[in-house]
Image (tube, rainbow, N blue to C red):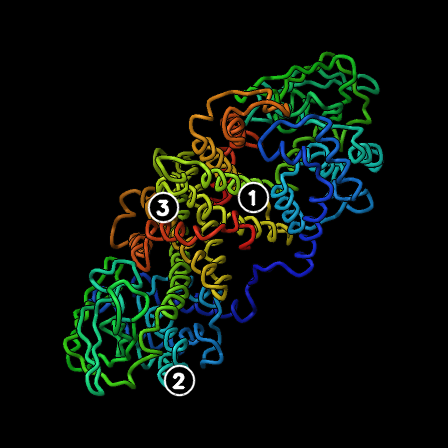
Amino acid sequence: MDFGLSEDQTMLRDMLRRFLKDRYSHEARRAVLASGQAFDAAMFAELAELGILGAVFAPEHGGYGGAGTDLMVVFEELGRAGVIEPVLGSAVLAGGLLTALDAEGQSEVIQQVIAGQTILTLAHAEPESRYDLNHVTTHASTSGGTIVLNGTKAHVQGGAQAEILLVSAREEGEPSDEHGISLFLIPSTTAGVHCHSHVNVDGTSSARITLEAVAVDQSQRLGPPGQTYAAMEAAHARATLALCAEALGAMEAAKALTVEYLKERKQFGVPIGSFQALQHRLADMLIEMEQARSAVINLASHLEADRLTRERHVSATKNLIGRVGALVAEECIQMHGGIGMTDEYALSHHARRLVMIDHIFGDVDHHLDRFILLSSGPETTGNSADAG
Amino acid sequence: MDLAYTPEQEAFRAELRGFLVENLSGQVREKVRLGKRLTKAEMQDWHATLNARGWLAMNWPREYGGAEWDAVQRQIFEEEACRAHAPRIVPFGLKMLAPVLFEFGSEEQRQRFLPPILSGEHWWCQGYSEPGAGSDLASLRTRAVREGNHYVVNGQKTWTTLGQYANWIFCLVRTDPDAKKQEGISFLLIDMDTPGVTVRPIVLIDGAAEVNEVFFDNVRVPVENLVGEENRGWTYAKYLLTHERTNIAGVGFSDAALATLKHVAAHTMAGGRPLHQNPHFAARMAQVEIDLMAMRTTNLRMLSAAAKGQAPGVESSMLKVKGTLLRQELSALLRRAVGPDAMPYLPDFLDGGDNADPLGPEHAPAAAPEYFNMRKLSIFGGSNEVQRTIIAKSALGL
């Protein structure tokens, strides 16, 4: 049992933290937000140059990391700085699917992703799918040698920046069947692909993408026809870990601002941190943050476990992060008072991201429900002692 | 980072399991499983069984008859003992007094007091709280006045857990009434058979007398029973509060309670379906399980940090608050799970009467008493409010 980081991971963390502290200041970030693009191409290139994208890929895929702990280290730092560029969407989620389904055939694309030269995104969710990974109504019909896609994809992270879309479409079955879902690699400039980008509450951007009679050929199919669900679920497990680690970073940033403020801000002639009412709120928040970190460690340690164990940890961790994320956002704002609500102050940005993270890959209710479902198999272990 | 246990640790776990199966009597296991009250003899027998194997004093050095287990081994023991429904180890002599003697006592005191703890000859209890000194422990007023080779002790202690079984008590007493309140306190070992010591049980909300009042009326204590230096007792007491508290989170207890709760919820019909299919109940149960999964790792992380000598104070405060809240929630869920069968108060059943009728499912009679008993967790050992203040002050650098 060892809770320490490797030497390489410690170096990566320190290097990334220093870089983001210098180059990704709150002011710089707000300037990017003000541009309306939710994306700084030069910054994204620099992150790639630092090797941040490579750190989420395993060495056999041309990266130099890829383990759960590597994801944890990288995304905690991205979260601390509030990075809005689509590292998660391009490298972890879409990139993860490429490596899982056709690492050899797609090695060139993967190299471009690692180098930051190509941005990928997974176009999977739909207006009606909410948080259900199996809900796909976008349709793929084959006639002759050509496949034609029709449908609408929603909440596609970084859709406006992506040069290549991984589009899920149903070739068989009912809208909620796990079987029958295929994936296609489609350049975003393909005829019939329409991208409507929008910014999100937390400063990131997503897109709604409509596919109108988009013609693709067999070579654009990724993985076996109709059988991508298992890979999709596994890729989302990794992406959920990255997202939860990002939340940890945002929590740490919000906490640091709040602790500082409690010491500096004076009311009734004394620092407000001397008031027990605020001390106890802070203490409860700190306890829950330790729980949040433990939950992320648990998920990082079970990414390679059997499917049921892994997914129970996905839901347990995402549920806990959702609860603690909202708690930290709300409590830090409350302890600050009005200043915590201003757009000018960094806390409101961390708070927005923390709360919006609960709306990505399933919220607290979704994952509580799913955890119950996954735990209700024939005579589960009874307690969690065996899961350690 | 690696959460897995080493092969040695897994082998250790397997060895413990085998030991527990072979050495824990079926009758005692059944009493613990159903939340029944153990007798003094049953607790002492379990101590003797562990001691015979060299596992009673798990945190002591080998040279004093201890097992010298590291933090992870101790955690594994707690998990396995709880899972097997073994009695808990009575901690006062083994885990509370002994560390103070190792750190601050004389070699003579160690030789005199440690062996009887192992043999069971001495049953220790803790004389800290007083009627006027709870969270503000340092305001304690029990006086010890030096007269020749003795201290003469007068005053009262309270909430003395299992004091009715004890023959020795370690006490915080005031030796200098004029000093600042933390600086006039001494740590004194008192034979409870000394004339002037009176023990009076306090019946609590669960109907049992787990705690006591202890009165001291001109009790003469030999000066060699002073631990460390006079007026330094507060330092020793604080040491106790932040060290050797590896089980403060109670993860093993919570695991066992969750297993019981799941079993009951699966076998209790409510509204035409098993209770665990009631979405509201299932949600609360799942929430606790998720918190407990994280808690287990939080506990191991903090034990691992403490083992490396990193500040144990705040960590044990965090574990205490979260761990006790989880145990309380589990006890509330079990109480609700047994429904109206939580109502009957059945002391004969709880005291282990073999033929006593539980008037309902076997887990029902102890559910409400246990729920009420668990209120103590957030009050004793430094109330959760005191812990929160410690946590916040540390974070704020106050």
Q: Earlier in the sequence, mark 2 or mark 3?
A: 2
Check the image and report above or below for A205 versus B133.
below
Name the element at disc 2. helix
Q: Residues within 10 Å of mark 1 (few under 14, many from 20)?
A: many
Q: Which residue is mark 1?
A: B251
Horizontal arrangement in the rendering, residue B309 relative to residue B395 (left or right): right
Horizontal arrangement in the rendering, residue A242 relative to residue B31 (left or right): left
Amino acid type at circle 2 is Ser
Q: Residues within 10 Å of mark 3 (few under 14, many from 20)?
A: many
Given residues B351 and A341, the one toward you in this image is B351
Amino acid type at circle 1 is Val
Label 3: chain?
A
Is residue B140 shown to the viewer in this render?
Answer: no
Is residue B153 shown to the viewer in this render?
Answer: yes
Question: Residue B88 at x, y = what percent?
Answer: 65, 36
Looking at the rendered image, the quarter that the N terminus of chain B falls into is bottom right
Q: Which residue is mark 2?
A: A107
Residue A201 occupies quadrant = bottom left
Residue B288 occupies quadrant = top left
Amino acid type at circle 3 is Leu
Q: Which residue is mark 3?
A: A327
Determine if marks 2 and 3 fall on one subunit.
Answer: yes
Check the image and report above or below for A72 versus B192.
below
| Spatial CA span between label 1 and label 2 | 46 Å
